[in-house]
Amino acid sequence: MLTLTLTLRQSKEQRFQNEQLLQVNSSLGGEVKLLQKKLQEVSSLQQGGGGQLASLHDELQRLREELQEAHALRGKLQEEHANEKQGLTQGEELQKENSLLKSEKEEMNQKILKLTRSSAVY
């Protein structure tokens, strides 16, 4: 029963982390679109000789830095997710091994009990 509870909890944690990754991916997609739009605006202003070019360059640089930070966060979340998934997999393997060992122990106890009973008869 404990194994089932642990597995369900681990499954919920994986789903939560997957949702977090999807949110980060969605956020990054939106930021990329925003950066592309800003780049188009800057390009059109450069062609028109607009006076706001310097401030737009600064804003573009700021947005690029934000995007880099978002990429770093995404990488960190993906790494955490991979580590958690690996830990969960190891936990599941240990639970299986534990179950097998319990079965073997029970078999050995039954054999010992049989031998004890048969030696008590003689």
Image: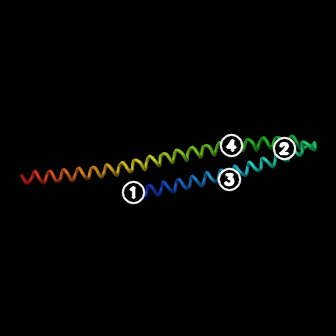
Q: Quadrant of residue 47?
A: top right
Q: Nearer the viewer, mark 3 or mark 4?
A: 3
Q: Which residue is mark 4?
A: 69
Q: Residue at x 85, y 47 (%)?
A: 41
Gap in angstroms between the C-alphas marked 1 and 2: 58 Å
Residue at point 47%, 56% (across, down): 9
Secondary structure beneath disc 2? helix
Residue 49, given in percent of the width and then of the height, sits at: 93, 42
x%, y% of residue 16? 56, 55
User: Going by the image, does 100 lie left or right of 39?
Assistant: left
Viewer-nearest residue: 42 or 97: 97
Which mark is first along the chain, 2 or 4? 2
Tell me which label, 1 or 3, sits earlier in the chain: 1
Of label 1 and label 4, which has the lower sequence position? 1
Element on which disc 4 rests:
helix
Q: Quadrant of the N terminus?
A: bottom left
Q: CA distance from mark 1 to mark 3?
A: 36 Å
Q: Earlier in the sequence, mark 2 or mark 3?
A: 3
Q: Earlier in the sequence, mark 3 or mark 4?
A: 3
- The residue under label 1 is 2
Quarter holding residue 59 = top right
What residue is pinned by disc 2?
56
Residue bearing mark 3: 26
Q: Residues within 10 Å of mark 4 (few under 14, many from 20)?
A: few
Q: CB of mark 1 within 8 Å of CB of mark 3? A: no
Q: Helix or strand or loop: what does disc 1 sit on?
A: helix
